[in-house]
Every structure is written in structure tokens, then in C-alpha cells.
Image (spheres, grey):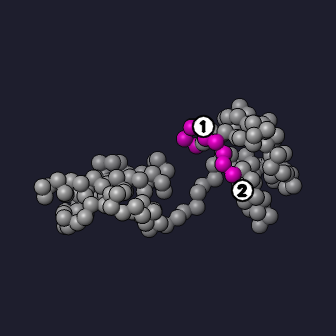
Amino acid sequence: MKKRILVQNVLGNAMLALDCETATKSIKDRNSFERLLSDSYERNRDEPFRRPLDDKSDPKRFERAVSSKGGSARKSDKLHELIFAIVRSNLGVSRRTLLYELKKCVGNGVIASVDVRSGEVHFIDDTGLEQQVVNLKDRLSRIKEEIDSR
């Protein structure tokens, strides 16, 4: 029974660390699952009978763990650089004009598809996966502020 509790604690804490690393680190900066398990085992060896941390017993666990790591600014991706170049050439660009400019760039390795009518833009991220752009308007305003501040 004691060993089962230790295994539950170790696995629960390793899964928490994995969730945190997935949310906060890029793939190349993450630790392996084996490393997370061994670290969790080392931490739990001193206190093997602590209450296991799982989502049912502590629903705020993930948020606390992520917030304790602190935030770091995201690196700009290819889409950010493309929008930055478009906005730099025309600072008064609107969201709709930006959609048309992005539609011209479909097939260049960054933009996968643009639907001007619905405002959906799909791009290929740094890992090679296709993702939908959310809050294009917010991205545009942040880039305009960035250019204005320079």
C-alpha cells in the first residue's frame, strides 16, 4: 500500500511537471518524461506519504504550477514577421486590408489559407503544423503599437 501511494505521488507530480513544461516551454527545451519521473521520485523520496496531487483533489493545481514558473515573452513567429512587414509598409492598414494582403501570400510557406469573408486565417507555425489565427485584430494592434514605439 505504501509503495502504491508513492507511485501515485511520483506519477502525479511528473504529469504535473509535463503539463507545465508543455504549456511554457518549446519542444526542444522540454525535459524527457523519464527525467521528470526521476526528479519527481527524488522529491517524493523524502516525503513519500504526502497527499497525491491530482486534478480531482486540487483543481487549481495546474494554474498554480504554471504561474509559479513565471511568464516569458513569446518569440515572434513567421506570421508575426509577415504581418510586421505588411504593417511597416502601410501603417494605416485595416484588418480587412490585412486579410487581403495575407491572401496574396498563400502558398509561401507561412500562410496556408485565408477566407476573407469569415476572417479565418490558417498559418503554418514554426513546428510545421497548420493552426488557425485567433484574434487577428489584436495581433494587428500590437504590431502597430510596436512599430509606433520605435
Specify the principal SS of the magenta part. Answer: loop
Give me the residue at 40% from left, 61% from top.
59
Secondary element at tag 1 = strand
Please identify the quarter of the rendering in which residue 69 is found: bottom left
Q: In this view, does 93 lie to the left or right of 67?
A: right
Looking at the picture, which amino acid does disc 2 mark?
Asp
Q: Name the residue under label 1.
A: 130
Q: Where is residue 137 in the image (x, y as percent from the top left)?
A: 74, 53
Q: In which quarter of the image is the N terminus?
A: bottom left
Q: Is residue 102 visible?
A: no
Tell me, for residue 72, which label it has, or none: none
Give me the residue at 34% from left, 52% from top.
15
Reply yes or no: does residue 59 show up in magenta. no
Q: Nearer the viewer, residue 5 or 102?
A: 5
Q: Is residue 20 left or right of residue 94?
A: left
Tell me, for residue 138, which label it has, or none: 2
Q: Position of residue 61 (x, y in %)?
A: 39, 63
Mark 2 crowd level (few <14, some 14–19, many ≥20, 10 Å Cα): few
Please identify the quarter of the rendering in which residue 116 is found: top right
Q: Position of residue 145 (x, y in %)?
A: 76, 63
Q: Is residue 125 above or below residue 65?
A: above
Q: Which of marks 1 and 2 is nearer the N terminus?
A: 1
Mark 1 crowd level (few <14, some 14–19, many ≥20, 10 Å Cα): some
**Are discs 1 and 2 less than 8 Å apart at CB?**
no
Please give the range of residues in magenta.
126-135
Q: Nearer the viewer, residue 57 or 131?
A: 57
Q: Where is residue 3 in the image (x, y as percent from the top left)?
A: 14, 55
CA separation, marks 1 and 2?
Answer: 20 Å
Q: In which quarter of the image is the C terminus?
A: bottom right
List the single residue furthest toward the top: 107
Give me the residue at 73% from left, 46% from top.
82
Looking at the picture, which amino acid does disc 1 mark?
Glu
